[in-house]
Amino acid sequence: MEEELCYSTVIFKPFDNEKRQSTVPQFEEPVLYAEVKRKQSNSHTTTETSEKGASTSTSPVYRRAAVFLGLLCLLLLAVLTAVSIFHYIHMSKHNNILAQYNKETAANLQLLADKEVLEQERAWLVTQGQQMNSTLDFILHKSIFSADKYCQSTGNGVRCTSCPQNWIQNGSSCYYFHTGQYWNTWTESQEYCKNYGAQLAIIDSVAEQEFINQHTAFYYDTYHGYWIGLFEKVANTWVWTNGALLEKRFWAQHPYEGYMYCVMSMPSIIPLRSWNSENCRMKNRWICEVEVITWPTFLQAQRNHSDPST
C-alpha cells in the first residue's frame, strides 16, 4: 500500500496589544510554515505497536529463561564435577583393590608352590621312613650283619649298596660266586655265607638256574663244581637250607642216595641239567645267596655289578 501525503499551511501573526492600541494597523507579512506529514497505513502502525508490545512483554520471559538456563548449566557443571570426583575416588579404590588382589593372588600362588614342595618333601620323608623301617627290620632278623660289607664312607658321606661288596644282584637276591684258590666243604661253605647273613643258594626257578649256570666256570676237573644249599636229609629226600623240600630238579644224572650227600651246580652247556650230588666233605667252590637290602635313598650308592672275588 502506497503512503498518502498530507499538506497543510499554517500562518502565524504577531500579537502585540500595545501596538494594537497606539498605532495604526499596518499591513504585516504573515509567516508561512509548511509541514508535510506522512500518513501511515493502519496495518503498519498496528504491526509496530504489536511488535513493541511483544518485545516489551517477552523481554522478561527471555531473561527468566536465560537465568534458568544459566542456573541449569551451573547445576550440570556441579553434577559433572561431583561425578568426576566420585569416579576418581571410585577408580582409585578400584585400582587399590585390584593391586591388592594381584598381590594376594601372587602370594597365594607362591603358597601353593610352597605347599607342593612341602608335600613332595613330606612324601620323600615318608618313603625314607618306610625304607628305614624296612632296613631296620632286615638287620634285626639277621643273626649276623656287618654294615661295613654294605656301606663305605666317601667324600659325599656314607654310601650303601643293595648287595655286599663284590656280590651280584639278580632280581631280589644277591649272589656271591667264590672263585678263590681255597675251597670248602659243604658245611664250611654254609658257615662262610652265614657271615654275610646269607646261606648257600636256593634255586627254585628256571630263570635262577640259568643265571647260576651263566656265572659258573669250569675249574680244576669235571668233578668239581659249586656247592648250593641242597642236601639229602634222609634217603632220597632232598631239602634246601631253609627247610623247603625240593620241587624244581635240574639233575645232570640220577643223584647218589645215602646220608651225607650234598648238591653242586656244575658248569654246563645245558643249564637245566647241571646238578650233581657228592659227599658233603668234598671241597669245592660255593655260591651264597642273600636277599637285597633296600637302604634309604640318601644312603644309596650305585649298584655294584662287579664280578665276585675273594
Image (cartoon, rainbow, N blue to C red):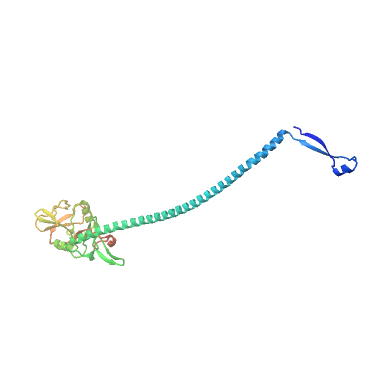
Percent position (x, y) of residue 136?
21, 61
To which quarter of the image does residue 197 belong?
bottom left
Between 260 and 84, the residue placed more toward the observer is: 84
Q: Which residue is pictured at 63% across the width and 41% down the height?
A: 58
Residue found farthest to the top: 1
Percent position (x, y) of residue 6?
79, 34
Quadrant of the image containing the N terminus? top right
Residue 53 visible somewhere in the drawing: yes
Residue 217 visible somewhere in the drawing: no
Between 269 and 159, the residue placed more toward the observer is: 159
Count the marks: how many? 0
Judge from the rendering whether residue 35 lies leftward or rightward of residue 211; answer left or right: right
Q: Which residue is pictured at 67% across the width and 38% down the height?
A: 51
Between 207 and 116, the residue placed more toward the observer is: 116
Quadrant of the image containing the C terminus? bottom left
Judge from the rendering whether residue 128 lies leftward or rightward of residue 88; answer left or right: left
Q: Which residue is pictured at 86% across the width and 44% down the height?
A: 18
Percent position (x, y) of residue 10?
82, 38
Q: Is residue 301 above or below residue 64?
A: below
To which quarter of the image does residue 224 belong?
bottom left
Q: Which residue is pictured at 65% across the width and 41% down the height?
A: 56
Percent position (x, y) of residue 135?
22, 60
Q: Is residue 87 above or below residue 281?
A: above
